[in-house]
């Protein structure tokens, strides 16, 4: 899966001038990602042994879809987590954009007239994703301009979004209208958003596109640098002229955009716009980011790690289903894996810190011993003379 | 330690005296002794074999410049850190203080410079935080309130135990801190800059309290940058320099010149006063700038005016609380001005944010490097590039090769000692981190650089290198405004010294014609004779700095405000 992301570190240009390779520095980040990869490998080995169908093409297609939905949301979530923020509203936004799209396929009553407008499919898709971005913009403005806690703002938005979804759907699911009608010029939704170019679900292509785009954004643009630096030390970033508030607003727009994309892809996938679509998706997204080695305290995390994290969750939950573990135990196991991931991360950091401390103490002792030896030898010389 | 023969049973058994302040040792007895204490951090030797006594019923004042080792010693005495070599003796017994709670249990309390109170709790709850008195039904609030009331009465600040700390003035909060320390039956009370937040009248109250405590046998260790105050309260003074205790003296032999002479010891090994200087047009002009702090109602910067010319290095000298940092942050664009004007190359900066000001050519190297200067999780290169990323943007993306090239050239030129631009910033020593932060601002191609205590926490060698760098840049036309509370730096590393005190500019001095005593006296508010004329004797640049006149004219308004503050207390 390493093909999905670009290089996270600007290698090449700098390594020539660096005398020593930065082995010790990158080791930590390699371990974090390797850990998730090792977990993924173990999961695949175990479930393949337990069930022959696990790696069958049909099952892999199912996994790919689930993973893609979660990965797209998780990549959006990564943006806000890099800033030490959180977005709990993405699940509701998925539902809301699905409901908006469903409603638009049924036609838009033009106010003050009897006319009903049927926008073209691509217009519907753009409007729906736009609604997702708008939700994100509201989140972002409240958080950056009013200094409200991201947890609270997006928790509120979780309710608002879910409520609006229910209002828009009025208790029914929108199923048949999504197909569109030839005469209305709004056909083609399923043909595009449930398609499988080259045998791979369109959602997976979308995930790859988002991963590449976000990876470039994080590593190759000033915006990415600003995001990492505000996440690590906001005050220092601000004094360096980083537009801290603007960065904060924009990342929530990005998560909203991702949620909007998932909303569209999901209603095409399940061929229906339902009121509970996207429920608790935010939790899986956060879990993927965390398993991928990002720090909730900000400043640390990569696109590659997040995508791997989404794969770990996807392969695990699918495997549990396929070997017939009871749904109740599935939830328990998934939760335990998430806790394990962060616990291992923390333990690793503690061990590294201890080692660094021990090194510093040893170095200090060496220095003082050397100083003492010098003093002694000086004393002897003086005595000898 | 000699046994206390005269005072009978009460202090005869030193081991039992830990529980009660009233049982503290006889005045003059050594209660705490530091024996050959050394402390090293990495390769830095913060303390070098210090021997030091604390005596019951006396105020021992510690003098020393920043980085001289005072605060390290305080950390060791209060159990925050452990010495690399040497040990402590309490009442003649060898003790190891592994934590602050162990120190407190043995009667050693410290009052930190920053108040460690929970503003949302009451005075009573703060005093007993972590040491609540438990009764049969949970916390015995009545007993706690009683003790609190007694303590506050003893300290002559009878506020109700139920008052929330956030409703108290800073001076009163300081007294709550002292009450908390006393509530642990402290026999040794360490005070780190206790007066930095106090008004003059509050300082007198505090000194009264200190005298009372010493009469009760409490040993006080007192640290202050405010030399005259510290001399006033001292019974005994020790002076630190570069991690060594260089002098110890009794109160009757101590005066300001002695303190300054021993503190500084020798001149810094750099002196840039006689470097060739070419000053051009006024680059930065600060006119009547006032900064108000709405939360405290104070005015930390009061009608300050100062100009910085191209190629000129101006030192803003002042002691803690003079308003230097507030002025610098306001200039950088972090805080809004309550009045006045700031212009850069004649352009008014009002309403411009930090980023705009950096783009315009003025950025700040902040005082607190860890909090405001560096991005801890990132590499040296990323840190240095942060302020000037826009320079290397083509289309949507960064030209990373150009960026790396520029950053690495800058690392070499500035002399940042690092394994490479990819090394984590936290792997660097303090001095090199500071050079990286300065490098970050220089990479923005500035007209004027503001530096707040640029040599704080930097070892002596790196200090000279930092100033040498600034003088090189100044020779190419950069204007520099730096803040310091180090007299040596002010004298040897500037073209002009502007002295601030209590938010105002006191006077301007020529580093080649002034003396340490004069600068320090000015920082206390005394305008030296020869600086009273409006035009300073400086002749190198186009003469005449009208701001010295304007600053003196505002003196009357300021003194009124300070008296009202005093009256309120």
Image: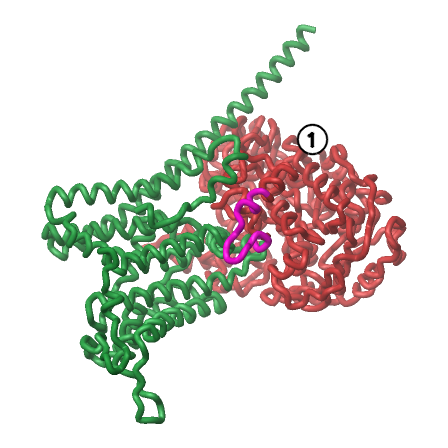
Chain colours: A green, B red
Quarter residue A166 falls in: bottom left
Q: Is residue A149 above or below residue A361?
A: below
Outermost residue to the bottom: A113
A385 left or right of A240?
right
Residue range in magenta is: B389-405
- x and y percentages locating residue A239 in the rendered image: 58, 55
Q: Chain of mark 1?
A: B
On the image, numbered disc 1 is attached to which residue?
Answer: B246
Up-down relation of residue B23 to residue B35 (above or below): below
Q: Horizontal placement of B215 versus A215: left or right?
A: right
Q: Is residue B49 above or below residue B400?
A: above
Report if residue A332 is visible in the image.
no
Residue B369: x %, y % from top left: 58, 47
Asked if the magenta segment contains residue B351, the reply would be no
Q: Nearer the viewer, residue B57 or A259?
A: A259
Q: The C terminus of chain B lies in which quarter of the figure?
A: bottom right
Q: Secondary structure at mark 1?
A: strand
Where residue B378 appears, as percent x and y from the top left, is 49, 45
* Residue visible at 27% across and 62% down in the picture: A281
Q: Residue at x 71, y 59 (%)?
A: B503
């Amino acid at each position: 899966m390493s093909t999905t992301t670009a290089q996270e570190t600007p290698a090449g240009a700098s390594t020539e001038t660096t005398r020593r390779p930065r082995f010790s520095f990158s080791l930590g980040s390699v371990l974090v990602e390797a850990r998730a990869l090792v977990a993924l490998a173990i999961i695949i080995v175990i479930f393949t042994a337990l069930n022959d169908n696990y790696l069958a093409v049909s099952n892999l297609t199912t996994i790919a879809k689930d993973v893609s939905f979660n990965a797209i949301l998780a990549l959006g979530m990564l943006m806000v987590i890099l800033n030490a923020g959180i977005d709990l509203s993405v699940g509701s936004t998925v539902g809301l954009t699905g409901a908006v799209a469903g409603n638009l396929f049924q036609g838009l009553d033009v106010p003050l007239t009897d006319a009903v407008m049927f926008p073209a499919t691509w217009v519907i898709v753009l409007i729906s994703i736009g609604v997702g971005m708008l939700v994100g913009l509201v989140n972002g403005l409240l958080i950056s301009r009013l200094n409200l806690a991201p947890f609270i703002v997006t928790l509120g938005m979780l309710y608002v979004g879910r409520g609006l979804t229910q209002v828009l759907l009025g208790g029914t699911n929108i199923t048949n209208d999504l197909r569109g009608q030839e005469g209305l010029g709004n056909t083609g939704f399923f043909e595009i958003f449930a398609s499988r170019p080259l045998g791979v679900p369109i959602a997976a292509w979308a995930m790859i596109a988002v991963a590449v785009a976000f990876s470039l954004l994080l590593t190759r643009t000033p915006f990415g640098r600003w995001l990492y630096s505000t996440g690590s030390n906001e005050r220092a970033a601000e004094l360096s002229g980083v537009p801290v508030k603007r960065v904060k607003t924009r990342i929530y727009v990005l998560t909203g955009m991702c949620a909007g994309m998932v909303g569209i892809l999901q209603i095409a996938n399940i061929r229906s716009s339902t009121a509970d679509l996207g429920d608790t998706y935010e939790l899986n997204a956060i879990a993927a980011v965390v398993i991928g080695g990002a720090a909730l305290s900000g400043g640390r995390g990569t696109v590659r790690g997040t995508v791997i994290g989404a794969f770990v969750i996807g392969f695990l939950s699918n495997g549990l289903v396929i070997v017939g573990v009871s749904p109740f135990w599935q939830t328990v196991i998934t939760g335990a894996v998430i806790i394990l991931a962060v616990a291992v991360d923390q333990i690793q950091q503690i061990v590294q810190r201890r080692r660094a401390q021990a090194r510093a103490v040893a170095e200090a002792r060496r220095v003082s011993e050397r100083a003492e030896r010098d003093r002694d030898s000086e004393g002897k010389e003086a005595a000898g003379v | 330690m000699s046994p206390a023969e005269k005072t009978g049973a009460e202090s005869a058994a030193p081991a039992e005296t830990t529980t009660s302040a009233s049982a503290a040792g006889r005045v003059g007895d050594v209660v705490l002794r530091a024996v050959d204490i050394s402390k090293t951090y990495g390769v830095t030797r913060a303390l070098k074999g210090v021997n030091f006594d604390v005596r019951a019923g006396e105020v021992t004042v510690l003098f020393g410049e920043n980085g001289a080792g005072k605060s390290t010693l305080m950390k060791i005495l209060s159990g925050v850190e452990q010495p690399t070599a040497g040990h402590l003796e309490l009442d003649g017994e060898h003790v190891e203080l592994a934590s602050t709670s162990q120190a407190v249990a043995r009667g050693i309390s410290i009052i930190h410079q920053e108040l460690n109170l929970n503003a949302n709790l009451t005075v009573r709850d703060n005093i007993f935080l972590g040491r609540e008195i438990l009764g049969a039904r949970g916390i015995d609030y009545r007993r706690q309130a009683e003790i609190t009331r007694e303590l506050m009465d003893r300290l002559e600040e009878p506020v109700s135990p139920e008052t929330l700390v956030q409703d108290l003035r800073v001076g009163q909060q300081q007294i709550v801190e002292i009450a908390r320390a006393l509530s642990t039956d402290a026999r040794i009370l360490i005070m780190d800059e206790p007066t930095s937040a106090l008004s003059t009248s509050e300082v007198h109250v505090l000194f009264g309290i200190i005298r009372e405590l010493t009469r009760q046998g409490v040993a006080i260790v007192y640290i202050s940058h405010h030399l005259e105050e510290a001399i006033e309260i001292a019974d005994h003074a020790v002076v630190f320099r570069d991690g060594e205790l260089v002098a110890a003296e009794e109160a009757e032999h101590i005066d300001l010149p002695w303190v300054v002479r021993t503190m500084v010891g020798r001149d810094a090994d750099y002196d840039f006063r006689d470097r060739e200087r070419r000053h051009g047009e006024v680059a930065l002009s600060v006119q009547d700038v006032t900064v108000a702090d709405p939360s405290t109602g104070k005015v930390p910067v009061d009608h300050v005016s100062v100009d910085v010319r191209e190629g000129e290095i101006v030192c803003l000298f002042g002691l803690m609380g003079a308003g230097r940092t507030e002025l610098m942050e306001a200039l950088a664009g972090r805080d809004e001005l309550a009045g006045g004007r700031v212009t850069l190359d004649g352009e008014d900066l009002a309403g411009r944010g930090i980023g705009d000001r950096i783009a315009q050519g003025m950025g700040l190297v902040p005082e607190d490097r860890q909090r405001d200067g560096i991005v801890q999780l990132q590499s040296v290169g990323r840190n240095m590039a942060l302020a000037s990323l826009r320079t290397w943007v083509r289309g949507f993306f960064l030209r990373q090769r150009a960026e790396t090239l520029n950053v690495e050239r800058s690392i070499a030129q500035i002399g940042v000692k690092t394994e490479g631009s990819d090394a984590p910033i936290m792997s660097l020593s303090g001095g090199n981190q500071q050079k990286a932060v300065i490098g970050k601002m220089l990479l923005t191609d500035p007209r004027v650089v503001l530096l707040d205590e640029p040599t704080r926490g930097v070892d002596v060698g790196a200090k000279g290198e930092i100033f040498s760098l600034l003088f090189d840049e100044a020779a190419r036309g950069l204007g520099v405004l730096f803040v310091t509370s180090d007299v040596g730096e002010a004298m040897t590393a500037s073209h002009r010294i502007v002295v601030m005190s209590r938010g105002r500019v006191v006077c301007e001095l020529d580093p080649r014609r002034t003396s340490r005593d004069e600068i320090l006296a000015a920082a206390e508010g005394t305008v030296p004779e020869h600086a009273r004329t409006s035009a300073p004797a400086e002749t190198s640049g186009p003469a005449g700095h009208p701001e010295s006149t304007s600053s003196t004219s505002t003196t009357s308004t300021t003194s009124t405000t300070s008296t009202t503050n005093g009256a309120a207390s």
